[in-house]
Amino acid sequence: MALRAATRRLASHLRAAPLSVGAERWIQSTSSNDAQGHPKPTALPKLKDNFLDGTSSTYLEELEERYRSDPSSVDKTWASFFGSLESGVAPEAVAEAFHAFEQGSKVAPLTAASISNQSIQESMRLLLLVRAYQVNGHFMAQLDPLGIDTRPVPVELDPALYGFHDKDLDREFFLGTWNMSGFMHEDRPIRTLREVLRRLQESYCGPIGFEYMHIPDRDRCNWLRERIETHDKEEYSLQRKMHMLDRLAWSEMFENFLANKFTAAKRFGLEGCETLVPGMKAMIDLSADLGTESICIGMPHRGRLNILANVVRKPMQQIFAEFGGMKPQGDSYYGTGDVKYHLGTSYDRPTVSGKRVHLSLMANPSHLEAVDPVVQGKVRAKQHFSNDTTRDKNLGILLHGDGSFSGQGVVYETLGMQQLPEYGVGGTIHIVVNNQVAFTTDPKKSRSSPYCTDVAKAFNCPVFHVNGDDVEAVVRASEMAAEWRSRWKSDVVIDLVCYRKFGHNEIDEPSFTQPLMYQAIRSHKSALSQYIKQLEEEKIATKEQIQEVTDNVQGFLSHHFETAKEYKQDKRDWLSSYWSGYNSPSQLSRIRNTGVPMEFLKEVGNAITTIPEDIEPHRMVKKVYEQRRQMMETGEGIDWGFAEALAFGTLLSEGNHVRITGQDTERGTFSHRHALIHDQKMGHKYIPLAHVFSGQAAGQFTISNSHLSEYGTLGFELGYALENPNSLVLWEAQFGDFANTAQVIFDQFMSSGEAKWLRQNGLTVLLPHGYDGQGPEHSSARLERFLQMVDENPYKLPPVDESKWFTGGHLGGQIQQINWQIANCTTPANYFHLLRRQIHRQFRKPLVVMSPKALLRSPHAKSPLWEFDDKADDKGIQGVRFKRVIMDEGATDRSFDPPKEDSFKRIVFCSGKVYYDLREERKEQGKEKEVAIVRVEQLAPFPFDLVNRELKRYPNADVMWAQEEPMNMGAYFHIAPRLKTCMASCDRSSPHQIPYAGRPNSASTATGYLGTHKEEQQKVVKDAMNLEHTTY
């Protein structure tokens, strides 16, 4: 009865509404009886008339009766009309809507009437409901392929929470909101609540769960909404679906083939996440279309072989040969090698659109996530050397595990670089291969957040959670990630929720710890089987077409398995294109001088001590630069900071790239560098080394403070140094002992990378080191750890070609064959030559420098300008180079067999700052003719030849090693066996233990008491000068 009353009220309002000529077609009187209230009976066929052709209240009542009996018996516009009245739309609103339509409104009258009945409270609640799906819809998404991850539905997604019930489902609502995209766009079509909920669930609760509402940027959120909240569900074409099928078949059948051929081998296969391959390939194809020319990939071991074969296109023969235990042939340099699931490679591959893209997969250790910053650094270097200022041409893709992404701190350190001026790469695409288990650890024990990807939300990264069994959803998420990175130049994360068909490796038993999960896995159909069934049901592909795809893959794999038996390793891949002409350790590199012509040196010195007039530096900084200008003019007193600047400036002038970063590097921890000058009035910044010569390219010299990270930033710089040998790349620790938080990079990459992966690296690391009474945490850079990793035989002397002694070529390839160099310099000039030597050679080696603290301003640790030039000042020596050993200040002859000095009773070998303390004590005791102090500036490779020279010079002197560090630290245990080897080669008897002057064994690196420190330091130098002190 309520509906009938509403119908009569509507008819009354329609008659009362003002009519225009056009409106007569909506309400038509057919006889005079209408005016008297006695309408004629309406013919049955009229009941099928359109709503807009209605005539009278009697007619409306007849339609109502018909609608009540069978809603489908009336025209759909009438059904909508009566439905609106049943939903509570006021008849008056209908009449007013018709009037508005007649006046020009574009909204259909019944729709407008329904909307006009929409209260402000309902509008607000509906907007909250939509927002709830945008924020929390991912909690209802169908993400787990196994269906065992049961999560409670958030109450925020229940329409009843907002006052909506079943009777409201077919009401039409308007959602328009100013300056919004997606469902809330002002031009969005008006839909019923049922349709809105269906599209919300399709968009946010399907096989992809989107997290992006944490991003505080309207434009970025709108960009995503436009792609998520589409009018209708997106569908792929037949051609695209067949292409996905082909790629998925390659992914799964490759793993099956390896499993059948190499049953007992560990391969860390991709079973359970085979859709990763078609997803990555779609991402790469689209990225290439968007302008990417080079992609650098970092990933852990799971799925690595599949990515190498099917994404990067490493030859199948090589992969199969490596499984067969292939070994290097002949005498060529191949290093120690590494397991096959750690190796990298690089290839050019075509895309589906006909473009070509260079792909490189970085080699990495088992330390999960360690490769992340390395990839970032390499990408940044690629961008620098290709002048990719827009960050479009070079892209990084990082693959992660679920446990490591949430558990490893280096992930956070790497994510934190994305917007830093000298570390950003224009965004990285992260793909988390989410096994839903970390080795044997359940998610609830491996993280404290709902998702393993939640750490990325701290950096405003959108996260796309996707069901790993749905290849079309994986491709869609991958392509959206590629678009995001191209458009917004920031990181994006794909959480690929999958499973691990076997254990941590193929011979592991996962049911020990996850019995229920692996019950489900054993009965679960693979992604390929599911997709084949889907395509057959959709009539996309026949069984014959599918069989043709699988036969092609199987035939290819079988053929290349047979040819792998004859495969020989290709040497071409051992260095990338920039490294052409650089020598391997088996190829002897010639010695190059590092001195600089005086005129050139002064030209550079004057340029880097000039501050523009419009820059007003701090008065103390101004004084520093004035003093440096005076050093150039007088040629005396070059200090450490200026020597470093001269090394950088001369290398820049020679066309090299120089980059130095670290914590507080711009100023220098000890306020010694001041490479970046801050204007004290306007805040402008000026870098003198960026203006060494006219036309110097922007970015040729780069100096930057880093965020408070060691592991991440050291890894970044190592990756940067990998790209191009024509660059001096330095990382400086704030204090040397802080470097221990980056130990993974030192151990797994710097010290062993060349041996494992045949990749040279010239990264230079500056670690402030020295005992100044600053306590346990600011004294030692843990020199002993770096020396322990040196791969040098302490008992074998390298051969010496005496005919090349004065040119420096007498040692052959000693320095090329060692894994890295360790130095502890005592003079600014020697530091200058050490840095320049890193570039002026035909190979690259990592260099670790125990850089000074107290010596930075010591009046004793200064060098005259002539020590930097290219004129040798010692008899017979040709050229000026880094001095691996500095003779006693009283010695002058640097020949192979110098004149004997029989009066000396002791040779004290030392390294670093302690030399100046020893020299002062010797002077006080007047033992300049009794005790020789010889500085070992290069600790590794050990200078056997020069130590032998000094032993020959002082035939009657006993041998002692002096150091500031405790005996169980520092260089003592590295030096001692090498000194004994040298003594034996000179036919000198050596004690069972080399005499030692230094601090006793200690658990802590140094005392925290200044008074105790001074006492210990005095004892060290006095023991060294005490000729009766011969014990250790």
Image: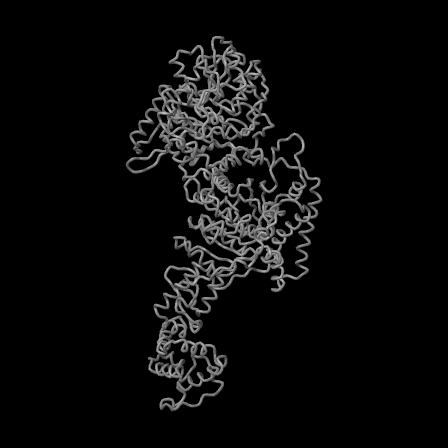
- Asked if residue 339 is positioned above or below residue 513 in the image, the reply reads above
Color scheme of the displayed model: one colour
Q: Quadrant of residue 538?
A: bottom right
| Near-viewer residue (636 or 454) | 454
Q: Is residue 157 above or below residue 997?
A: below
Q: Nearer the viewer, residue 708 or 893?
A: 708
Q: Picture coordinates of residue 882 (x, y %)?
A: 48, 22
Q: Is residue 689 visible?
A: yes
Q: How many marks?
A: 0
Please state, as top left, top right, bottom left or bottom right, where the N terminus lies in the image.
bottom left
Residue 926 location (% of width, % of height): 39, 11
Nearer-the-camera pick, 675 or 1028: 1028
Q: Quadrant of residue 928?
A: top left
Instruction: Note whether residue 294 is visible.
Output: no
Which x, y percent locates residue 730? 45, 32
In percent of width and height, residue 858 lies at 36, 22
- Position of residue 354 relative to residue 718, above or below, is below
Who is closer to the viewer here, 590 or 921? 921
Q: Residue at x 46, y 40 (%)?
A: 712
- Within the image, what quadrant is residue 336 found in? top right
